[in-house]
């Protein structure tokens, strides 16, 4: 009598193992994609916040109270406005020339600021000078076409640079 070779059978246990391994591999691909997207979003938020902070620092750097072109930027020049900045124009992207961080995708950031003047110096408390409340927002559309926004706010007083302890130019 001849012995016949039986074809190896694919058992249920082997099928379950293959399915589990397939699921784990697909989860790893999904997780890598998700973490890459989160890294890009985090870096875009970093760019947006740095743009808002740069604008606030510019407002704080006034050299005189009243407009005087020969002296430079004045407290009176602090008014509401906006501008658009491309991410490739930022110092963040300049430092990441090879785009290792994947944040420099040609995104446009809209930096807008609202300036509210105090009515005048508080006369009931004469030591408090007039001030301006500045709210700065940076908005952009991320790579998933979701609108994003970061905001900061501060108060800028009307003290002269000398009264703030800065040298007079």
Image: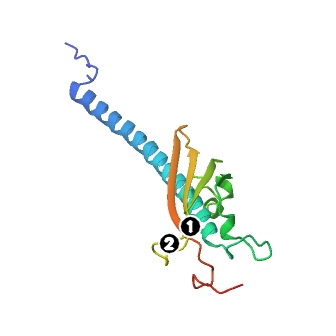
In the rendered view, tell whether residue 18 sits above or below residue 73.
above
Residue found at the very far left of the displayed protein:
1
**Residue 132 occupies which quadrant of the picture?**
bottom right
| Residue 102 shows in the view | no
| Residue 29 shows in the view | yes
Question: Residue 134's spot in the image, x, y percent?
Answer: 55, 60
Task: Looking at the picture, tell me which residue is in the foreground, 118 or 17.
Answer: 118
Question: Residue 144's spot in the image, x, y percent?
Answer: 53, 38
Residue 120: assigned label = 1
The secondary structure type at the circle numbered 1 is loop
Q: Do the residues labelled 1 and 2 touch (CB within 8 Å)?
A: yes
**x 62%, y 79%: residue:** 160
Residue found at the very far top of the displayed protein:
1
**Residue 54 occupies which quadrant of the picture?**
bottom right
Residue 123: assigned label = 2
- Using the numbered discs, state the Cα–Cα distance from disc 1 to disc 2 in whole angstroms: 8 Å
């Amino acid at each position: 009598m001849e012995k016949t070779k039986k074809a190896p059978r694919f058992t249920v246990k082997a099928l379950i193992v293959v399915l589990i391994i397939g699921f784990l591999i697909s989860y790893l691909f999904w997780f890598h994609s998700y973490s890459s997207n989160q890294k890009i979003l985090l870096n875009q938020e970093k760019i947006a916040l740095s743009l808002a902070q740069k604008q606030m620092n510019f407002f704080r750097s006034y050299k005189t109270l009243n407009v005087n072109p020969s002296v430079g930027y004045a407290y009176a020049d602090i008014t509401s406005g906006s501008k658009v900045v491309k991410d490739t124009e930022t110092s963040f992207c300049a430092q990441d020339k090879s785009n290792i961080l994947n944040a420099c995708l040609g995104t446009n950031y809209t930096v807008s600021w609202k300036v509210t003047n105090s009515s005048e110096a508080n006369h009931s408390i004469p030591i408090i000078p007039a001030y301006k409340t500045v709210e700065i927002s940076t908005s952009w559309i991320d790579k998933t076409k979701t609108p994003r926004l970061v905001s900061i706010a501060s108060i800028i007083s009307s003290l002269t640079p000398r009264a703030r302890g800065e040298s007079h130019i």
